[in-house]
Amino acid sequence: MDKLTIINNALVATGNETVNVLNDPSDEYRAANTAFDRAVRFLASRHTWPFAMTTEALTRVPDADNKSRKYSKNGFRLPPDMFHLKEVYHGTHIFTDYEIIGDVLSCCYDSEIYAAVVKAPADANWHPMAEEIITRYVEAGCLRSLNEDFREATAREAGAEALLEETRTHVDQQNPARNMYKSKIADARRRRRV
């Protein structure tokens, strides 16, 4: 994803002057850049995009930083730049018996804790459909701040929302279907069949 290209596409689509470089001092750049940054954070945190998922090893925190009463001896720092915690692992096994207070995850295990988290993906990793959604949100931001056309801005946001629904199902087809609830009984049955 090229930020300058998305900003210029949005500026052209809204009838505004394009910019030649990032950090241009013009009003067009400031408005489009603000809309771009908001759209990226919003879109990355709104859905568990496969291209925004990563698994990271968590590091222990001193017991003084762990405010949990239930698991006061085993606290781990969550990644500071994550948007959403998806799953927690001890080694290679998912577990759900943990507590989060602030940015510290507390649990009964003392090592090998990993977290599957949603983060802002690297610019190159964005799916092309997600880039189009970002462009439409930037267009809406430009229409509001530069053109002062609030009705058309609302229409562009509605178009971005409709495209978002289509994109989420399309991108999520890459991974197998999953249940939100992970049944221990169903998991045991699956293991018995193998």
Image: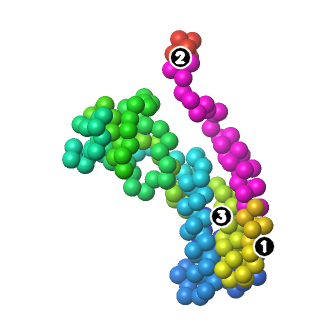
Amino acid type, callout 3:
Ile
Total number of numbered labels? Answer: 3
Quadrant of the snapshot with the N terminus:
bottom right
Q: Position of residue 49 (x, y in %)?
A: 59, 48
Residue in the picture at 28% in, 45% down: 67
> Local crowd at mark 3 within 10 Å, few (<14), some, or many (≥20)?
many
**Image height of 85 relative to 111, above or below:** below
Amino acid type, callout 1:
Arg
Residue where numbered disc 1 is placed: 151
Q: Nearer the viewer, residue 39 or 192?
A: 39
Task: State the mark number for residue 185.
Answer: 2
**Which region of the structure is painted magenta?**
159-186
Quadrant of the snapshot with the C terminus:
top right
> Local crowd at mark 2 within 10 Å, few (<14), some, or many (≥20)?
few
Residue in the picture at 42% in, 41% down: 115
Task: State the mark number for residue 134.
Answer: 3
Q: Quadrant of residue 58?
A: top left
